[in-house]
């Protein structure tokens, strides 16, 4: 299982409604990274996206029955989310239109990251240099558990703040 996340220095990942920043190329990178894989996300993340992400299983872990989940696989426990992801991978490997990855992505938000981060061996992280102090947070990581590699850095410009791509690999 891998985790994908964008956050600032204070581990803020969102406000529960929308993206807090627009980064050129980041959504394309996210799409190429996750295409053909199941994504486990919470209800708020699902609602902030507003639609199913094509070419991927959109697995929504929720306690709610009130939201429109058209195009999603709805589950009520983390174990059930993993089972549905495995089932999707097995079923889709026979679909010639989809190149299936044999990994599951933890997709957010905060509660989902807290439930699943211990099962992740890799974190694909976008670090955004933006001053936001309130919002949903990514779990605090023990630095000794991760080998961190900066992949690419982008300087601030008129359209976006400074940001960088990181690859975290679990070492323990």
Image (spheres, helix red, strand yellow):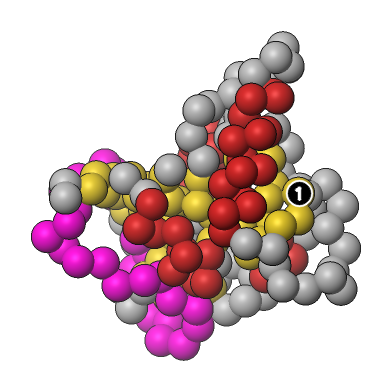
Residue 21: tell me if it is visible. no
View extreme (bottom): residue: 134
Report which residue position mark 1 lands on.
73
Q: How many marks?
A: 1
View extreme (left): residue: 144
Looking at the picture, tell me which residue is in the foreground, 49 or 158.
Answer: 49
Q: Position of residue 106 (x, y in %)?
A: 50, 52
Residue 33: tell me if it is visible. yes
Please report the residue visible at 64 percent of the width from the left and 19 percent of the height from the top.
93
| Quarter placement of the N terminus | top left
Which quadrant of the view contains residue 133? bottom left
Which quadrant of the view contains residue 17? bottom right
Residue 1 is covered by the magenta coloring: no
Please report the residue visible at 76 percent of the width from the left and 55 percent of the height from the top.
74
Q: Which segment did they paint magenta?
A: 126-154
Please determine whether, in this image, residue 155 is positioned above or below residue 140.
above
Q: Relative to 98, is 160 on the left or the right?
A: left
Residue 135 is covered by the magenta coloring: yes
Please determine whether, in this image, residue 135 is positioned above or below residue 3.
below
Please determine whether, in this image, residue 122 is positioned above or below residue 108.
above
Please determine whether, in this image, residue 83 is positioned above or below residue 158.
above
Q: Position of residue 48 (x, y in %)?
A: 70, 66
Q: Position of residue 61 (x, y in %)?
A: 66, 61
């Amino acid at each position: 299982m891998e985790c994908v996340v964008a956050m600032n220095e204070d581990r803020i990942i969102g406000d529960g409604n929308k993206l807090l920043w627009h980064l050129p190329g980041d959504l394309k990178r996210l799409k190429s990274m996750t295409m053909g894989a199941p994504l486990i996300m919470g209800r708020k993340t699902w609602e902030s996206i507003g639609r199913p992400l094509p070419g991927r299983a959109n697995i929504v872990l929720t306690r709610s029955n009130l939201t429109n989940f058209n195009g999603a696989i709805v589950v009520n426990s983390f174990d059930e989310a993993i089972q549905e992801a495995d089932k999707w991978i097995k079923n889709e490997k026979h679909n010639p239109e989809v190149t299936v990855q044999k990994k599951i992505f933890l997709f957010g938000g905060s509660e989902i990251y807290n439930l699943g981060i211990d099962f992740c061996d890799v974190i694909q992280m976008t670090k955004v240099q933006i001053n936001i102090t309130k919002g949903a947070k990514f779990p605090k990581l023990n630095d000794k558990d991760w080998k961190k590699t900066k992949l690419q850095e982008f300087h601030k410009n008129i359209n976006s703040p400074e940001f960088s791509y990181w690859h975290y690999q679990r070492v323990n």
